[in-house]
Amino acid sequence: MPPPRDALLRRRRLREAVFDDHSPEHHAGDSRPLRGIEGTIVDASPHLLLLSAPDGSEVRLPISAMASIWHAGRAGPAALRPGRNAIVRPTDAGGLAAERIWVDITRVTGVIAGRSAGVIEVDAGPHRGHVRIVVPGRALGRIQVRHPLLEPGSLIDVIGVRRDGEIQGLLPATMSPQPASHADHPPPARRSGAVSRILRGTATWYDHPRGAYGAAYPALDPHGDGGGCGSGPASPLPYLSMASELHVRNDCTGRGTRIPVIECGCLAARFCDRCVRCGTSPRGRILELTRTAFVDLGGDLDKGCFNVTARVGH
């Protein structure tokens, strides 16, 4: 007996929604990942950057004449000092010239555990521990536009720089305004009925302490190797196991690649903001990508997010 007509229509819509590895769009030159490079600056001139990669190898990168450098804002070649950390995005998927360079950039996402004057203590979750942020006076107003309640129990997400052994918070990393809410009153979960294997929403990034490549996902299977996501709010997303692979596409650039799940994005489900980089994302945070994964898909670290489509499984 053939399936009912409405079932056939649902299958057809699903096939049309899925982007696959064999589609012409995926293989087009402008949709391939960019292969970002991370390392410690060894030497730099206005035209050449020498990095020590995490594996100990040295990487020489010509600097494009149109290259943009970020270090606590727009900066020049003087920011490329030996010993600083750099994330580099090349000019294209096969090129080696540096187009964008972010120096000592970091991000802190979590729940405020305490505050004293310009110092904020943040509980960044069980995988990332407690982090201290120093907020310069000039940056406080910018951060409070998105986080008006800088008090214990409130959510916070800021982009900043590592400087002299401390993290300076400079910019709010949330996208559309985050409602002034406490972490113990998260938005209600919407898990009900069948869960789609095609996910559309917001991708953010985080600073993995060991420079790993992958994604943090807010709905790990509680019975798998990942052990679930602890006592955080339930997510409406389908359960995945550690090392599951997602096919992730930046909807703003069209670049896509396969990315493994390496951590639980414990705090992503607590936020209810949306990315507005290329239209408003249809859902809030579904992935936190490591810095190089975010850059590979054409993301700008100082902007904080992009609209994303992720396909579960092969």
Image (cartoon, rainbow, N blue to C red):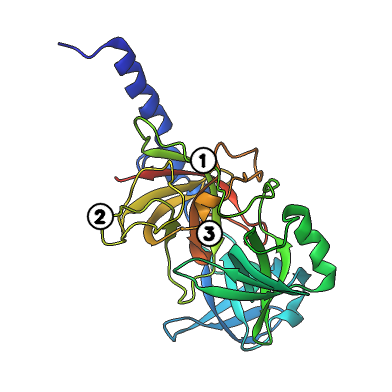
Above or below, 263 against 20 in this view is: below
Residue at x 35%, y 30% (from the top left corner): 193
Above or below, 264 against 190 in this view is: below
Q: Point out the tag, 3 or 1, that comes first from the N-terminus.
A: 1
Q: Point out the tag, 1 or 2, that comes first from the N-terminus.
A: 1
In the image, residue 130 lies at what x, y percent?
55, 74
Residue at x 49%, y 76% (from the top left corner): 209
Q: Are marks 3 and 1 in contact (CB under 8 Å)?
A: no
Tell me: 295 left or right of 263: right
Tell me: 49 left or right of 78: left
Residue identified by numbered label 1: 188
Judge by depth and name the residue closer to the eye, 96 or 57.
57
- Nearer to us: label 3 or label 2: 2
C-alpha span from label 3 to label 1? 28 Å
In the image, residue 303 lies at what x, y percent?
67, 57
Residue identified by numbered label 3: 294
Residue identified by numbered label 2: 223
C-alpha span from label 1 to label 2? 23 Å
Quadrant of residue 164 in the image? bottom right
- Specify the amino acid type for callout 1: Pro
Report the quarter where the N terminus lies: top left
Tag of residue 270: none
- Nearer to us: label 3 or label 1: 1
The extreme left residue here reads 1
Q: Secondary structure at mark 3?
A: helix
Judge by depth and name the residue closer to the eye, 197 or 296.
197
In the image, residue 70 lies at what x, y percent?
71, 69
Judge by depth and name the residue closer to the eye, 310 or 109.
109
Above or below, 186 against 260 in this view is: above
- Specify the amino acid type for callout 2: His
Above or below, 121 against 215 in this view is: below
